[in-house]
């Protein structure tokens, strides 16, 4: 995922299998940090107790951050908001242990 262009891709063995898809990410004070990390777990329907909000098609990485459905016109508290199609594709394709790369 590239923060500077608000885009994400699914890449498998160097081949783009989906994307780019539009995203939004963490706002000032809640930045989504550049990192190479791994998918930790997935939940089709997750409720954020931290923000009292739904997180559909949540694919968690880097601690409590996740790709999930959300308004891409507004920045988040660190999660990566995606369109319904984007979040669903990421949820279906990624598995725990898969690498997530966040670049500027």
Image (tube, rainbow, N blue to C red):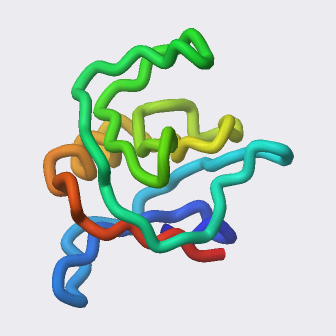
Q: Is residue 9 left or right of residue 80?
A: left
Q: Is residue 44 left or right of residue 20?
A: left
Residue shown at the point (59%, 18%) measured from the top left: 50
- Residue 7 in the image, given as x and y percentages of width and height: 51, 64
Residue 6, above or below 50: below
Question: How many numbered discs sit on the rendered protein?
Answer: 0
Q: Is residue 102 left or right of residue 12?
A: right
Judging depth in this view, the residue of 62 and 73 nearest the camera is: 62
Judging depth in this view, the residue of 5 and 80 nearest the camera is: 80
Snapshot quadrant of residue 10: bottom left
Snapshot quadrant of residue 45: top left
Residue shown at the point (65%, 62%) measured from the top left: 33
Q: Residue furthest bottom?
A: 14
Residue 6, above or below 78: below
From the image, which quarter does the C terminus lie in? bottom right
- Residue 87 in the image, given as x and y percentages of width and height: 33, 43
Q: Is residue 78 left or right of residue 28?
A: left
Residue shown at the point (21%, 85%) measured from the top left: 15
Residue 32, above or below 103: above
- Residue 62 in the image, given as x and y percentages of width and height: 48, 54
Residue shown at the point (46%, 73%) measured from the top left: 36
Q: Residue furthest right?
A: 28
- Residue 40 in the image, given as x and y percentages of width and height: 30, 49
């Amino acid at each position: 995922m590239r923060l500077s262009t608000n885009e994400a891709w699914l890449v498998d063995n160097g081949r783009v299998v989906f994307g780019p898809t539009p995203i939004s990410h963490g706002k000032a004070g809640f930045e989504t940090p550049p990192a190479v990390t791994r998918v930790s777990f997935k939940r089709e329907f997750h409720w954020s107790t931290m923000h009292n909000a739904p997180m559909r098609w949540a694919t968690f990485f880097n601690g409590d951050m996740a790709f999930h459905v959300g308004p891409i016109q507004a920045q988040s508290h660190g999660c990566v908001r995606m369109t319904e199609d984007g979040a669903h594709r990421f949820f279906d394709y990624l598995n725990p242990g898969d690498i997530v790369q966040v670049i500027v």
